[in-house]
Image (cartoon, coloured by chain):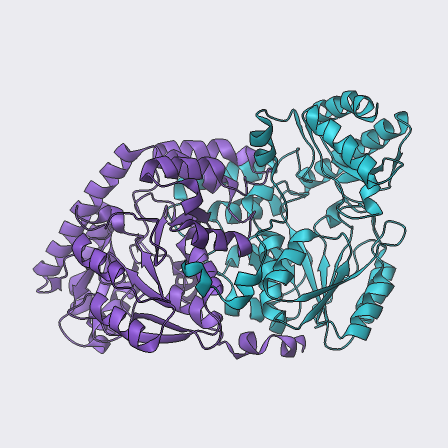
Chain colours: A purple, B cyan
């Protein structure tokens, strides 16, 4: 019973996980899914150039990756027009959010987020003993003004927002985000999660300003670049903040194959454009399927669509269960009133055929 | 200057890194190494079956890996004869050591290790505010009895030992390790790092006993399995201790390609046996090269050899510098008196040809 020697904080943590994976559901069900459109993965896959680079790198995996992520940081530096010292590469946004929590959060520290926003961020904040304060969504969008107000009144150290938002797919334009950034109170840092920004319309992403010490921008190769399983993402911000990651990160933590793949993926914006176009088509089709079933699909700037099932959370959960019964892997928001929706990720035509066939039966 | 809002602990941490990678050295030198035999990587590479599996998985990397690592844990369970609930899979031993530090260490907690043992473990302990207490090596071996004594007298919560040892390559037999495990004081957990155990002679690895809550055993695919860049390893121990990892780990943190590769690698013990044999031959050749230059090579149960340069640390550092000047990447122990040695990893014949040619010049 050495577990009694865990730190009081770790001992106090529940044994919850942010998400149950589809594989665990498949094992519990005793059969596979025919459409995997629940985790906002990119069914369109990574760039063929990235695949080729990763295949070539497979035999080189006996070598640790460069712990400085030098080549990738140089490429990201050129891509975004910010200096390498303003970039940290890590094990996906999830991994980087864990580091951020560790950098800023200890028992007694307050953190502001939206009620029903990204559970993995909450998991990390709770894991370091932070106190989560939440603001409700407003008309299915995160509410920048209310987040800022609560941060100011509570003295929060971190403020989390995703733009475009997950799980609703809604978004704010650059003007609103710029105003939010300008209003971050002293003593707080805005965690701006832009995992889905490549899918958003022009005018969504506020300008990068790495001289501003009040905001950290998070990007990933998991979504539009199709490399969720590679676990590679990055954050951009003021150099001194970025250096904080180096004090604590697992320096040899990035997978070498992922590093090579990300570099190749970054060099293939033509493929990225194709994916963005295919995702837009898939969103359109998901919306059309919803509409054909008398449901409203929320506008989305991401690679998924929230479908309002028109009743309460219990109803949407029942619809979700009926879709899963029909071997369609989808997820849904966790809290009311957003939990009146189910969330469907962009799929291949065959995935959406399956969804189209299953949805009326789920609603019946 | 939001860095002033770091937690006091993180703010107090130095900007050190456990290791500088060979790539950084190459950039600083402006030229590449001709032999990469400094990081105890396996130049023999992963199993061809693992390479093939990883190449096939590259196009599937759009999917997150199974966060429960179910299939790999099942395979490890069968391989080691322990239940899946006694196994946690993580981002290499480095990543798992970070989790262990987080589980057990907070400011004021004492941790015992050997002076000059694994720097990454020390990095993680310091990163959580732990107080490191050290025991000197004794005749170039870690000193189990002294480690236990210091843990008992200091009330340490963690005790670290690697067997076989890194950076010296020395080892203790199963009997000594069993005695050490039996003597772990109440309130302490032994972190037994067995990264190199596949290379050790029979009778080195003590029996696995996952009912004992006082020891956690760490294994990796980075060394004998040739997958350092994949970042995948595991720990085995009492179920309640193992559950602690689940409270804090980055659940989706393992790379999907690594997961698939590890599973394939685990199924190819014939290849593992070949690697072990090649490593033994390489160790023999490194020892012969040392001897031909009038130097003593320490016996090694790992995939590297510590060569005693016969004088003090300054001399060995000069020899190391002269090897690096000749494009041979090697490393050396960090503290006296072990720093009279340089550490040479098993290489391909061409790597060792280069080392053989360079060493006399480095000593001249």
Q: Between B272 and B151, which is closer to the camera in this rendering?
A: B151
Q: Position of residue B121 (x, y in %)?
A: 66, 57
Q: Residue at x 55, y 74 (%)?
A: A10
Is residue A142 visible in this depiction of the protein?
Answer: no
B253 w.r.t. B188: above or below = above
Q: Would you say A42 lies left or right of B9 here? A: left
Q: Between A89 and A166, which is closer to the camera in this rendering?
A: A89
Q: Position of residue A213 (x, y in %)?
A: 37, 56
Q: Would you say A160 lies left or right of B139 here? A: left
Q: How many marks?
A: 0
Q: Between B28 and A294, which is closer to the camera in this rendering?
A: B28
Q: Would you say A183 lies left or right of B233 here? A: left
Q: Position of residue B171 (x, y in %)?
A: 83, 51
Q: Residue at x 26, y 32 (%)?
A: A270
Q: Position of residue A161 (x, y in %)?
A: 29, 62
Is residue A258 visible in this depiction of the protein?
Answer: yes
Quadrant in which the C terminus of chain B is drawn = top right
Quadrant in which the N terminus of chain B is drawn = bottom left
Q: Residue at x 77, y 36 (%)?
A: B317
Quadrant in the picture for residue A21: bottom left
Quadrant in the picture for residue B190: bottom right
């Amino acid at each position: 019973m050495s577990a009694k020697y865990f730190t009081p904080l770790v001992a106090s943590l529940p044994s919850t996980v942010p998400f149950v994976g589809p594989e665990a559901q498949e094992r519990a069900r005793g059969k596979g899914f025919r459409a995997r459109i629940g985790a906002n993965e990119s069914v369109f896959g990574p760039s063929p150039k990235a695949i080729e680079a990763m295949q070539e790198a497979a035999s080189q995996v006996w070598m640790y990756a460069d712990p400085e992520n030098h080549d990738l940081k140089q490429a990201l530096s050129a891509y975004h027009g910010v200096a390498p010292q303003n970039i940290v590469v890590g094990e996906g946004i999830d991994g980087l959010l864990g580091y951020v929590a560790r950098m800023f959060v200890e028992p007694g520290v307050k953190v502001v987020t939206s009620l029903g926003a990204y559970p993995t961020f909450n998991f990390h904040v709770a894991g370091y003993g932070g106190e989560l304060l939440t603001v409700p969504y407003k008309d299915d969008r995160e509410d920048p003004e209310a987040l800022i107000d609560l941060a100011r009144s509570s003295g929060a150290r971190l403020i989390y927002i995703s733009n475009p938002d997950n799980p609703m797919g809604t978004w704010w334009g650059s003007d609103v985000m710029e105003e939010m950034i300008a209003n971050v109170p002293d003593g707080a840092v805005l965690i701006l999660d832009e995992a889905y920004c490549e899918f958003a319309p022009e005018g969504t992403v506020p300008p990068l300003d790495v001289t501003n010490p009040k905001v950290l921008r998070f990007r990933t190769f998991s979504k539009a670049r199709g490399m969720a399983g590679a676990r590679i993402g990055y954050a951009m911000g003021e150099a001194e903040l970025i250096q904080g990651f180096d004090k604590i990160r697992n320096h040899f933590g990035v997978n070498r194959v992922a590093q090579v793949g990300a570099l190749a993926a970054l060099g293939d914006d033509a493929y990225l454009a194709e994916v963005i176009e295919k995702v837009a088509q898939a969103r359109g089709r998901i919306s059309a399927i919803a509409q054909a079933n008398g449901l409203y699909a929320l506008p989305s700037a991401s690679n998924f669509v929230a479908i309002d099932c028109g009743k309460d959370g219990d109803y949407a959960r029942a619809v979700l269960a009926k879709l899963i019964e029909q071997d369609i892997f989808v997820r849904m928001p966790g809290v009311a009133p957003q939990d009146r929706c189910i969330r469907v990720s962009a799929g291949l035509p065959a995935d959406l055929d399956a969804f189209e066939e299953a949805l009326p039966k789920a609603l019946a």
